[in-house]
Amino acid sequence: MARQIALLRGINLASRNRVSMPDLRAALEAAGHEDVATLVQSGNILLTSAKKPATLEREISKLVKDEFGVDAATVVRTRDELAGVIERNPIPDGPSIPKLFQVTFFSGEPDAAAVAKLAEQDFGTERFEVIGREAYAWHPEGIQKSKLARELGKTLRGDGTARNWNTVTKLLELAG
């Protein structure tokens, strides 16, 4: 059985889409998953399962809807896939300020035409690069007022969910 990381999109944002992490862990364990753990309140789940990531994506999204009444896209990576995401980092400056460096995880590869359209825009000092099913984004002047962050959300987001570099590396550490 593989150690896997499930990332829920759009939960526990202010007062919207509230999901208790202890209740989520209990529901996942009741559904037969092992070694369930969560990191912070934003839907970062570690679990052990023999199921394929695509199957887990569907099942966890359904569980969150059925148990908590929340529609949340779920993206899953194996421990080894997450290690590959970190190894492929195409923006060397990003980890220097990890809270301003994000990776958006998608279930499938983003549309190439949408990526090309985004690449045509001028984002000043901000940079992004898409490799496979991940979009790496560097926001050296902050994320709150970032034009790139807004455009990534509008143009590529789909089922994608972003995590900052601190969270990405901590999830790999916890995955063992």
Image: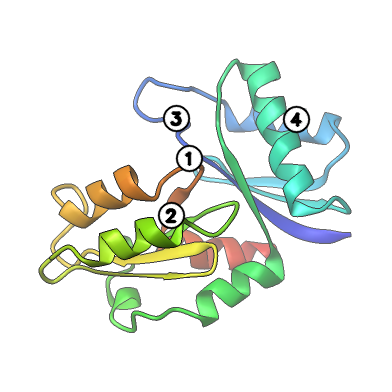
Q: Amino acid type of disc 1?
A: Ser
Q: Give the CA distance from mark 4 to mark 3.
A: 17 Å
Q: CA distance from mark 2 to mark 1?
A: 9 Å
Q: Residues within 10 Å of mark 2 (few under 14, many from 20)?
A: some
140 left or right, relative to 74: left
- Along the polypeptide, which appears first: circle 2 or circle 1? 1
The outermost residue toward the front is 113
Label 1 belongs to which residue?
Answer: 42
Residue 91 in the image, given as x and y percentages of width and height: 34, 79
Query: Which callout, 1 or 4, points at the residue further toward the start of the chain?
Result: 4
Answer whether residue 139 is visible to the viewer in this image.
Answer: yes
Mark 3 in CB contact with mark 2 (< 8 angstroms): no
Q: Around disc 3, counting alpha carbons within 10 Å, would you say few (fewer than 14), some (14 to 19), or many (20 or more)?
A: some
Q: Is residue 176 visible?
A: no
Instruction: Give percent across and percent down for residue 57.
Output: 69, 42
Q: Which residue, given by chain and number where applicable, does mark 4 sit on?
A: 26
Task: Evaluate if marks 4 and 2 touch, with contact meaning CB atoms under 8 Å apart.
Answer: no
Tell whether 9 sits left or right of 84: left
Q: Is residue 90 above or below residue 57?
A: below
Q: Can you identify the residue that label 2 sits on?
A: 163
Q: Label 3 belongs to which residue?
A: 12
Mark 3 and 1 residues: CB-CB less than 8 Å, in contact?
A: yes
Between label 4 and label 2, give the one nearer the viewer: 2
How many angstroms separate mark 1 from mark 4 (CA)? 16 Å
Residue 103 picture location, percent across and down: 42, 61
Q: Amino acid at mark 2?
A: Arg
110 and 125: which is toward the camera: 110
Cβ atoms at labels 2 and 1 below 8 Å apart: yes
Spatial separation of the CA atoms under disc 4 and disc 2: 24 Å
Quadrant occupied by the N terminus: bottom right
Question: Which numbered disc flags the more N-terminal residue, 4 or 3?
Answer: 3
Estimate how packed mark 4 is, as few (under 14), some (14 to 19) or many (20 or more) residues with alpha carbons within 10 Å: some
